[in-house]
Every structure is written in structure tokens, then in C-alpha cells.
Amino acid sequence: MSMATDPTASMPLTEHLRDLRKRLVRCLGLVALMFAGLFPFAQTLYTLISEPLRRFLPEGASMIATSVTSPFLTPFKLTAMCALFVAMPLLLHQAWGFMAPGLYRRERRIALPLLVSSIVLFYTGMAFAFFLVFPMMFGFFASVTPEGVAMMTDISQYLDFILALFLAFGLAFEIPVATFIVVWVGLADVPTLRRSRPYVIVGCFVVGMILTPPDVFSQTMLAVPMWLLFEAGLLACAWLKRPEPGKAIVADL
């Protein structure tokens, strides 16, 4: 055991800024490269992403574009978001490369798994929404459409709607990471979080009620995974041992 010094103490501020600029340029280049590769398939991407709704449209009905520019700008926006999502692991690698030199060994052992698990959980939440929640949601909306009303959704409004849900479900699946961080930084301990379990369960169902159609089955499909993810976060925290006061700067050898 030996006292650890600040890993970045010898690096001047200008060097930090130069490294940050270099990595930001790389990130922009990566996203631009992904966008250029995906843009020829923009129409196919929108056809794929709109399938959960189109399958429930009445026979002979279709989605519509109410704006002159929507047929171009909507697939363009979708391609840009897909490029960002596809490039996310590489972007996180750049972020890790910038932060890692300033972390102690113990902190690096915690931070890297958190980065990896957060992106995996975010993608899992998006997949959960697309493959399980969207079919139930749009099926419900189609079933309650009043008689005599044609169900024809604007392509731009549909994209904004599903992007918001992708974000909501992706963030909801970050619960284990959030729980771990809360314990790691000392905002709460595991016994306190366990005592708060009833409030967490109620909160999960409230969130499920807000984000899904007003039927019990759809709400449960979101609330139960959120609760299980909270429990997974508690299990992850069980092996966490915070350093004793005054010993946080001691490096693990």
C-alpha cells in the first residue's frame, strides 16, 4: 500500500483542453461517419421503426406527412439519431479515455463497468420498448379508435413520440446503475434503500401508468421490470465496500 498522488497533477490545463478538443473532434467524426453509412438506408430505417404502428392500421390506411418537408426531414432525423445510438459505444470509449487518467485504480475498477453496463441497459430498455411495449400500446390505441375515425398518424409526430419513449425506457432501465451510484457516493446505504422498497414499487407503477396506455397489463410490463432492476441494483451494492474516511486516496496495489 502506498499513498497515491493525483494522476493528472503533472498535466497542464492546456494539455487537458487539447486532449478534450481532439476527442470531441473524433466523436463528431464518428457520428458523421455512421450517419453517412446509414443515410442511404434512411427510408428503410423508417419503415422498420414504424412497423409496430403500421401493423395495426386499418386495411387501406397508411401513415401521412402533413408537412411539405416531412418526407425528407423525418427519415433524416431518424438516421441522425440511429447514427448517435450506433456510435455510442465508441463515444463512451472516447469519454473513458479522457476521464481514466484522472481516476485512481479503485475508481477505474468501478467506473468502467458502470459505463459499459449503462449503455447495455439503455439499449435493453429501447429493445424492451420496441419489441414488447410498442405492439401492446399501438394495439390498444387502434382498438379504442372511435367508429368513423380514420387512424392515420403523421410520420413526424410518430417519430417524436417513439423517440421520447425510447429515451424514457432507456433511462428507466438505468435504475441499477443509479442505485449503485447512490450507494457508492454515500447518499444512502443498502438498508435504507431496502426500507424504501414499498415507495419504490409504488413509484414504478406510477411511472408505468404515465408512460404506457391505461390498462393494467401494459403498466405492469414496465413497472415490474423497473422494480426488478432496482432489486438488481441492491444486489450489486451488496459487495460494495466504501473506503474508510481518510483512506480514500490510498491506491489498491
Image (tube, rainbow, N blue to C red):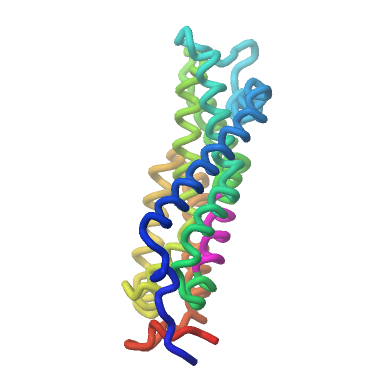
The quarter of the rendered structure image containing the C terminus is: bottom right
Q: From what the image shows, is residue 129 above or below residue 200?
A: above
| Image coordinates for residue 69, horizontal then vertical, percent | 48, 11
Q: Could you tell whether 20 is left or right of 26 in the image?
A: left
- The boundaries of the magenta stretch are 111-122
| Image coordinates for residue 58, horizontal then vertical, percent | 60, 17
Q: In this view of the protein, which residue sits in the foreground, 188 or 250?
A: 250
Q: In this view of the protein, which residue sits in the foreground, 229 or 146?
A: 229
Q: For residue 224, say whether it is visible.
A: no
Q: Could you tell whether 31 is left or right of 16 in the image?
A: right
Residue at the (41%, 62%) spot, across then down: 201
Dominant secondary structure (helix, strand or loop) of the stretch shown in magenta = helix
Quick check: is 121 in the magenta stretch? yes
Residue at the (41%, 69%) spot, across then down: 10
Q: From what the image shows, is residue 139 above or below residue 100?
A: above
| Image coordinates for residue 148, horizontal then vertical, percent | 48, 11
Q: Could you tell whether 132 is left or right of 193 in the image?
A: right
Residue at the (61%, 41%) spot, across then down: 86
